[in-house]
Image (cartoon, helix red, strand yellow):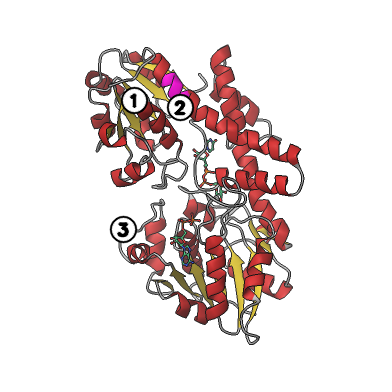
Amino acid sequence: MKIQKITCIGAGYVGGPTMAVIADRCPHIQVTVVDANAERIEAWNTDHLPVYEPGLDAVVKRARGRNLHFSTNIDEAIASADCIFISVNTPTKTEGEGAGKACDLRFIESCSRQIARAAENHTIIVEKSTLPVRTAEKILEVLATAGREKSFDVLSNPEFLAEGTAVKDLENPDRVLIGGQNEAAIQALVEVYLNWVPKERILTTNVWSAEMSKLAANAFLAQRVSSINSLSAFCEATGADVDEVARAVGMDTRIGSKFLKAGLGFGGSCFKKDVLNLVYLCEHYGLPEVATYWQQVLEMNEWQKKRVAQKVIQNLGGTVQGKRIAVLGFAFKKDTNDTREAPAIALCEHLLAAGANVVVHDPKVSFVKIQADLKHSPFMAKNLHSAESAEQACQGASAAVLATEWDSFRHLDWKAMATKMSAGAWIFDARNCTDHRSLKATGLKLWAVGK
Ligand code: UDX
Ligand code: ADP
């Protein structure tokens, strides 16, 4: 088994960057990315990629047209591939058994059906999307409906890239994990990664361990964020400083310094979905104590978002009715245009519900996207506005909330900003991402998370 032609189904935040890096690093492999969404594919073929990631433009430019192709002809791309990555979305179920917790495998199933129909000869199927444990079994069941002349291996190769650093994470991964049953198929995929990843960073396991490791890694990371956020409230109550505590704690090599930044709560497409999924699976397997343990990580996250919104309202005299509030940043973290589960959504919802005039500025998220994310807010149409810059958002505002830690916010000229805002205006730094000393020197009032 040798992989020469890869097809990836799903041209989203995972499929697009992952395939771009594989094509860049393996010029001898033809890589085709397909998607049911023609608009998305069209964008991948232009200079305005649908995904914003630092460094991605250059990688795509080097490989596109050479051995990286974006197409809507899914059947043809399936038929010609010897290896198919499944990178479709796996949202949380909204109805039926497990609604609100379990993973919706609809897109995985339809993809598997299409592969069963269109594949030719032997094909290695690689699960790239985050999936519940034992999904490989379900994919194999669907593939079993294909004709006898077709055969398949299913591997689990979970993606650990974080948005905003996707290219770096893909080019220099901590580890690549490949789970499977057939040693030859595993080896074929290992060979692909060996083109740029050192051998000792490629781990091979059984399929179920690989699937479980992805859920476990995200659950651990989410738990760290909830842990530090819970302590941020404790720091505020006691006079400790959460960044100082995180630094002291993180210098213990057993704990480590990463993922200890207190903030507005975690967002992104994975953490909430994966922890919910873990909770659901634990309940399913008769482990209610384990389910409750992980559920608390999510509850702490919801509480943190609500808590910050309440701090804004309390500090503005208990009401924000009719007051202009700038929300600086809307993406779920810096360096991405992704807003899935962004904590700024919940923050804006709370502020809009309390009657505020909310003016949002984000360097990479369009106002159309922001409006779509807040479409359930009853006062959205009337009270939600956008601004081209942080300065414009703050013009005449009673308060500004830093909701995403964009680098450009680090260097805001608070002296100039103070002259634009209402007298006695407040800054709420929910990400501890500005220079507090220079901010306070301007006379602006400051609330900062965990301080
Ligand atoms: C995550 C995992 O990191 C990645 O391995 C997996 O493949 C997908 O899910 P992602 O969601 O893209 O990646 O970004 P990540 O950097 O993990 O941040 C998630 C959220 O946690 C963001 O909202 C971020 O602002 C928040 N966060 C992270 C904190 O609030 N504090 C921290 O210290 C770290
Ligand atoms: P992720 O962050 O996991 O990459 P995205 O939502 O960004 O998730 O991308 C998933 C992509 O998968 C979407 O562009 C969607 O159109 C595509 N997709 C979902 N189901 C199918 C399918 N059956 N065939 C082709 N593309 C699909």
Q: Residues within 10 Å of mark 1 (few under 14, many from 20)?
A: many
As drawn, which residue projects farthest toward the front?
Answer: 96
Is 222 contained in the magenta span?
A: no
Camera-near label (1 vs 2) is 1
1 or 3: tag closer to the N-terminus: 3
Q: Which mark is residue 48?
A: 3
Q: Which mark is residue 257?
A: none
295 w.r.t. 172: above or below: above
Bounds of the magenta span?
308-312
Is 311 contained in the magenta span?
A: yes
Find out if the beta carbon at label 3 lies less than 8 Å from the nearest ligand 2 atom.
no
Give the amino acid at mark 3: His
Mark 1–mark 2 distance (CA, rounded to whole Å)? 13 Å
Callout 1 secondary element: strand
Mark 1–mark 3 distance (CA, rounded to whole Å)? 31 Å
1 or 2: tag closer to the N-terminus: 1
Residue 103: image location, x then y, percent = 59, 53
Give the amino acid at mark 2: Asn
- Location of mark 1 (residue): 400
121 w.r.t. 325: above or below: below
Residue 73: image location, x then y, percent = 41, 76
